[in-house]
Amino acid sequence: MKPRNVRLILKGEIEFMPVYDLLQWLEANRKTGILNITWTETSKTFYFQDGEIIFVSSQKRGQRFGEFLVSAGHLTKEELRAALEGSAIEGICFTEYLLKNNVFSPDTLRDMLSRLAQQILIELFSSTQGSFSFYTPLPEIVKNGPVRLCTGHLIFESVRKVDELKRDNDRDTDTIGWLRETLSKEDFRLPPLPDTISRLQRIISDERSTFRDATKILMSDQIITTRILKIANSPFYAGAGKIDSLHAAIARIGMKELMNIVTAVKLKDMIVSPSQKERIQAVLDDAILTAFLSKNLAEQCGEDPEEAFLGGLLHDLGKTVILNLIGENIIDDDQLEKLLDENHADIGALIARKWHFPDSIQEMILYHHNYQEAGDTKKIVALIQFSDGIIFKGVDNGLDEEIMNYLNLNRDKVTSLCQETADAFKYLKNA
């Protein structure tokens, strides 16, 4: 939208004339023309008439006004294409076409252009680099456009939001620093092993124990009893007839599998921070899915299915501790993900050691993102890493060809087992 026979009025470096000073000068002198700012290899353009901003644009993806309207859900791509073609055919500016054809009301159009202008200004105000040029004349097609934005108000709102973002960033930096130090020093209270799991561990390790001993421990917990009965009668364990006693259900499921189911149920007790409840529940749901898929794949690979299930169930245990530790603190999502990625395996292995889980389970947790570092458990750790990737990204994007070949798995079989996993999850989730 650059006119012919342009006349350069002013040019310089942002370092010596900050953007907000430049905008204030253009407003105070009621300038008409085009302000072009080149910053980080992109160009951002403001169209001024009598000191007011009548249009903005940018080379950055998503910051062209039409793209901005689409991303905000106000236009479809097809509607945008039709509007651009229509404005070109009629020889009028894009904003005028939108108003003329009642695509937007004047207030809505003004609000959307203002939001885009603020987004661009916030980026510019956050940097002291770049260059600018201001030239005339204004293109005829843009002159007397239907939208006019008060430059002073845009400056005020953008500066205010920059200050808010800086305060939020400083707060995030302080919180992240405290969390990193706390985690590195292990200066936090590890969650105790749920009493029910602890008592079951003792029974399973005692060769003299019977199903009746396990029944005595679990019969007082109505939630666990109900879930075990429903799971024992599900298609995954169903026998000749329906079971209606806890003792018979445990006999059908088996002691090791019982331990896995009780652990899955009791992991919900790890949610102690109300503000992080949804995040922790999402971690636990993914863990259960990973556990079921790991178990199913272990049967194909000649590995212990119950051990694979428990390893998959506990592989992200460290995330629950970190999220509970964060509590009410508000942290930027990207920084939180980085913190979780860097620390959850170490913290999870630490918990497993405190809970007296076998060394093999501790290794599965510690190396589930890098199976090649595991020792004797390398194959089953690879299996859990493979399952975790699929649960996180889906079969199409998360299937690791290298690990699949290492485990000698078939893609079609993996896809089929993923569906079985989804079905199993539904039963356990709704049990």
Image (tube, rainbow, N blue to C red):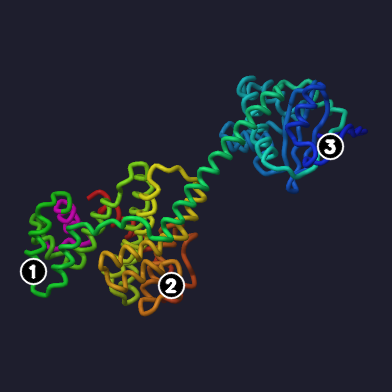
CA distance separating discs 2 and 3: 55 Å
Q: Which corner quadrant of the image does residue 80 belong to?
A: top right
In the rendered image, residue 296, in percent from the top left (x then y), is placed at 31, 67
**Which amino acid does the dot numbered 3 rest on?**
Ser
Residue under pointer 3: 133
Position of residue 242 in the picture relative to residue 156 (left or right): left
Magenta region: which residues? 225-240
**Callout 2 crowding tier (Cα within 10 Å): few <14, some 14–19, many ≥20:** many
| Residue at the spot 51% in from the left edge and 45% down from the top edge | 172
Front residue of this view, candidates 138 and 184: 184
**Callout 3 crowding tier (Cα within 10 Å): few <14, some 14–19, many ≥20:** some
User: Disc 1 on helix, strand or loop?
Assistant: loop
In the rendered image, residue 323, in percent from the top left (x then y), is placed at 38, 50
* Mark closest to the chain's N terminus, 2 or 3: 3
CA distance separating discs 3 and 1: 84 Å
| Magenta-drawn stretch contains 83 | no
User: Disc 3 on helix, strand or loop?
Assistant: strand
In the rendered image, residue 212, in percent from the top left (x then y), is placed at 6, 64
Disc sitting over residue 210 in the figure: 1
Q: Is residue 415 visible?
A: no
| Residue at the spot 42% in from the left edge and 55% down from the top edge | 182
**Which amino acid does the dot numbered 1 rest on?**
Thr
Q: Is residue 77 above or below residue 86?
A: below
Residue under pointer 2: 371
* Mark closest to the chain's N terminus, 2 or 1: 1
CA distance separating discs 2 and 1: 36 Å
| Magenta-drawn stretch contains 233 | yes
* Mark closest to the chain's N terminus, 3 or 1: 3
Q: Is residue 340 above or below residue 139?
A: below
